[in-house]
Image (tube, rainbow, N blue to C red):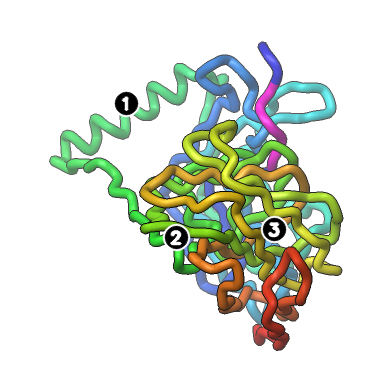
Amino acid sequence: MSQPSRRNSNAGLGILGGRAIELYENLVVSSGILPDGRLNASNFTGILVWDFYATGSTNFANNLVRDNVSGFNQYFEENGTLNRNDFEYRLAGPSGLEPNPLNSTNPILGVTTLRNTSLTGTLTLQTETDEWNLWRNKLTLNTVVVGVRRFIQYQANTAIQAENYNEMSGVVNFGSGVGYIGSGDFLRFRNLNLGTGVRSFTANVVTTEAGSSIQIRSGSPTGTLLGTLNVLATGSFSTLQSQRVTLPALQSGVKDIYLVFTGAVNVDWFRFDTSSTPVSTARAINRSATTSVKSTDQVLASELSFIVPN
C-alpha cells in the first residue's frame, strides 16, 4: 500500500449527545481503503456512542442503539495497519474507553445496545461494492428513486456554518462547527456567491495554539490563494473569537471556495464582506462558553462579550 491519507477520527454513525435518541437498522461498511489504494487514516469506528461533552445522565440518557450491522476497519497509526473496530463506546468526555459488551444496558453511558452484529468476512473494496449494489437493487425492487443531490448556493455575505461543507478532508463535524483540524486539512464550499465583490474574510474560531492559519483558496485545495487569515490564539477552547483579514484584491462571482488549514483551530462559521470592517453576530454552541471579539489587526474592530447559556 502507498502512504495513508491524513489522520483523523471519524465514525460511520454515532450518538455524541442528547437524550432518547434511537439509532437502528443501519448497515455501516468501510474497508478503510481508498480507491487509489491508500489506507484511509480517517477511519475510526463504524458506530460510536460517546457523551462527548461530558454532560452526564442529566443530558445524555435513555439512548438506544439496536439492530445495526457494522463492518469497519480502523487505521492504526502506530503500525500502519487496518483492524476491525465495528462498535465503540466511550466514557464521558475525552477520557478512555469503556469496556462495554456489544449488546447491553449501561447507565453510565446512557445507552442500551440490542441485537447489533458485526459484518462477517474480510472487508475489502469489493465488499463495499457488493453491499452498495445490494442496497441499490433493494431500492429498485421497491421503486425508490435516488435523485441527484442539490447543492445550496450560499451567499458569501451571510454567516455560513462551517459544518455545512460540501467536501472535507481531515476534520471532525461536531454538528455545530468543525474541529480536530491539522495542517493540510480543508473544507470545500461549492458555488459560493461572492456577488459583485468582497474585500474581507471573517471566521468565528477557537484555538489555544499560536501560528495556525486559514488559507482561502478558489477551485481546489491548491488553487488560487485569495487571502490568508493568521489565527490568533483565543486562550481556551471555550472562547470563540470572530477574526478578520482584508483580502489583497476584490473577489467576485460564483466560486468553489476551499478553506485550507495549517494548524489546529476549530471553526464555528465564516463570511465574506464588501467592507474590511464587517459587523459580527456570534452563535451559541452547545456548552457554556465565552464569545468575544477583540480589537486587533486580525479581528473585528467592534467589541462584543457575553456568556452563551447551555
What's the distance in space between the residues labelled 1 and 3, CA to CA? 37 Å
- Is residue 102 something one can see in this rendering? no
Please name the residue that numbered disc 1 is placed on: 133
What residue is at 64 percent from the left and 22 percent from the top?
Answer: 39
Where does the magenta region start and end?
4-8
Give the mark, 1 or 3, whose residue is nearer the N terminus. Answer: 1
Give the mark, 1 or 2, whose residue is nearer the N terminus. Answer: 1
For this view, does 232 lie left or right of residue 10?
right
Location of residue 137 with respect to 218 vertically, above or below: above
Please name the residue that numbered disc 2 is placed on: 156
Disc sitting over residue 65 in the figure:
none
What residue is at 53 percent from the left and 54 percent from the top?
Answer: 114
Principal secondary structure, stretch drawn in magenta: loop
Q: How many numbered tags mark residues here? A: 3
Q: Nearer the viewer, residue 56 or 98?
A: 56
Of marks 1 and 2, the one in the foreground:
2
Of marks 2 and 3, the one in the foreground:
2
What residue is at 69 percent from the left and 85 percent from the top?
Answer: 304
Examine the structure image and report whether residue 301 is included in the region drawn in magenta: no
Whether the residues at callouts 1 and 2 have beta carbons within 8 Å, the answer is: no
Please name the residue that numbered disc 3 is placed on: 266
Of marks 1 and 3, the one in the foreground:
3
What's the distance in space between the residues labelled 2 and 3, CA to CA? 20 Å
For this view, does 46 lie left or right of residue 294?
left
What residue is at 74 percent from the left and 43 percent from the top?
Answer: 262
Tag 3: amino acid: Asn
Mark 2 burial class by Cα count in 10 Å: few <14, some 14-19, many 20+: many
- Is residue 145 something one can see in this rendering? yes
Q: Quadrant of the N terminus?
A: top right
What's the distance in space between the residues labelled 1 and 2, CA to CA? 39 Å
